[in-house]
Image (cartoon, rainbow, N blue to C red):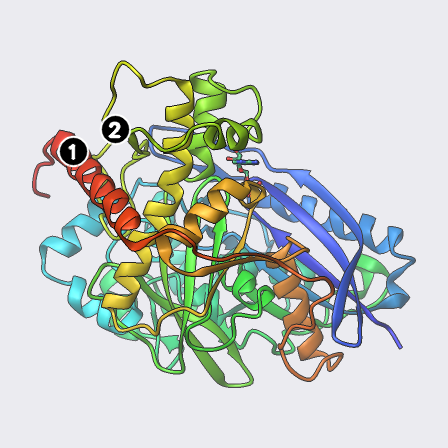
Amino acid sequence: MNRLILAIDQGTTSTRAIAFECADGRFSPVAVSQIELEQHFPASGWVEHDAAEIWTATLQTCREVVRKAGGVGRFAAIGITNQRETSVIWDAATGRPLHRAIVWQDRRTADVAARLAAQGLETKVQAATGLILDPYFSATKFAWLLDAVPGARERAAKGEVRLGTIDSWLIWNLTGGRSHVTDATNASRTSLMDLKTRQWRPDLCDLFNVPQNALPDIRGCADHLRDCDASLFGRALPIHGSAGDQQAALVGHGALNAGDAKITYGTGAFLVANVGDQPVVSTRRLLGTLGYDVRGTAAYALEGSIFSAGSAIQWLRDGVGLISESRHSEAMAQGLKDNGGVYLVPGFTGLGAPWWNPEARGTVVGLTRDSGPAHFVRAALEALAYQTRDLLDALYADGAPRLGRLKVDGGVTANAFAMQFVADICEVEVERPAFQEMTALGAARLAALGCGLIDDLQPVAAEAPAVWTPRMTAPERERLLAGWRRAVKAAIVAAPETEAP
Ligand code: ADP
């Protein structure tokens, strides 16, 4: 029997393919290929990718992995996971992109989101989609593309133009232009999908000025999305799984029940908490989103992001030069008996949930003549935990069940000091799996379920995880959190005043 799954992980900075061998419910990587992706910054706040380059890199990495893993005959299915919200427009007849893709970080449509918010429409949009009004999501990007490409609106009306997120773009190309579909998790990031019915909302398509006929059909995360074109790898492999990157990581971690949550600590940090089979609309400016939709059964999630996590460590290394390698931060922080009252609010690009203050900037408070380089390092690592605590407090305030364990992945989780501090400050057990590629693993698991290699998404752990248990006393934790809250207040007070939109 063919037991390999080809997982495509199309991320913001690189495109990767991983071949997983699936045996007795366990997934082991057997081959990997990766190609970096060029970032285009045509104007301040604008970020673009070349969609054609993304497809070429996807094909190249897949072909390399298929070859390394012993040929296409050993594969059962393809699973896809991708950077979410990034928006592509292409010609239905030629399959050529009509513009560079607008990347999720891009802020060019901020005025549109602000105008809709000023019209009092956020409540309506949030009730339907779970999302706040922000240029982050695809709807305003799609509309911008249709207006920017000459004739695109007229051609879209005639059915000659396709819109989609990266998953749609890849599936279109993998199927030789025969399939224009998206999975429900990616669709849940557009501001156009009704979270409950998991269908496009005509009223929202009108509101955002996006013609529904240019959008892909919405499918489940483990559906058979069609076979790929036989000419690509020598055989028509079925595409059997697809989910946005953070949702795929949720599945990869096996966070399948209400009260399960994962946080990925990379450059930024993304918390996704499973809240069960009913959507939750946040009152704390978390995002309501779809965890996954498998065989018609949905798991909903609340999501919150921290803009600067590992990037604060990068800044200490590359910007300030206090450390020569990220990993040195651990010993420096451990070398102090406490933080000496120094707090760093890493608002380099504003503050994310639950503060959502785009004007705030990085702030350090509590410096004394005793403060040295190690205090900056420790404060940057501690900030990860305080920011996580803020997200969890928002989550609980929204009525989400208390977490059993917080599952973690990403580059920063190599830092044991930081992970222990997260456990202490958040009063939760922190679990880091031995295998770290949770995003690709989630896509592989969805595809394996889709093609019948496994019966359910329940993970079968290959190796024991690392676990950190809270051990800080309550008064100590409260003292530290009080210091952090004062520091956040200072960062917000110091932020430039924004003019009302
Ligand atoms: P991304 O996927 O966002 O590029 P990664 O998951 O690869 O990020 O994580 C990279 C980040 O992790 C970098 O910001 C780096 O500074 C940080 N990092 C890596 N190792 C450590 C460590 N031992 N301690 C603290 N931060 C670390």
Q: Position of residue 228 (x, y in %)?
A: 73, 66
Q: Amino acid at mark 1?
A: Ala
Q: Observer-nearest residue: 457 or 293?
A: 457
Q: Observer-nearest residue: 148 or 240?
A: 240
Image marks 2 and 1: residues in contact by CB distance under 8 Å: yes
Q: Is residue 461 left or right of residue 387?
A: right
Q: Amino acid at mark 2?
A: Thr
- 365 lies above or below 167: above
Q: Is residue 433 left or right of residue 268?
A: right
* Secondary-structure class at tag 2: strand
Residue 182 visible in the displayed image: yes
Q: Residue at 52% of width from left, 65% of height from top?
A: 250
Residue beneath disc 1: 490
Q: Observer-nearest residue: 91 or 130?
A: 130
Name the quadrant where ligand 1 sits. top right
Residue 162 visible in the displayed image: no
Residue beneath disc 2: 363
Q: Residue at 20% of width from left, 44% of height from top?
A: 482
Toward which corner of the image does residue 461 lie, by quadrant? bottom right
Q: Earlier in the sequence, mark 2 or mark 1?
A: 2
* Secondary-structure class at tag 1: helix
Q: Residue at 30% of width from left, 40% of height from top?
A: 108
User: Label 2, label 1: how many angstroms apart (C-alpha)?
Assistant: 8 Å
Q: Is residue 461 left or right of residue 179?
A: right
In the rendered image, the quadrant that contains the C terminus is top left
In the rendered image, the quadrant that contains the N terminus is bottom right
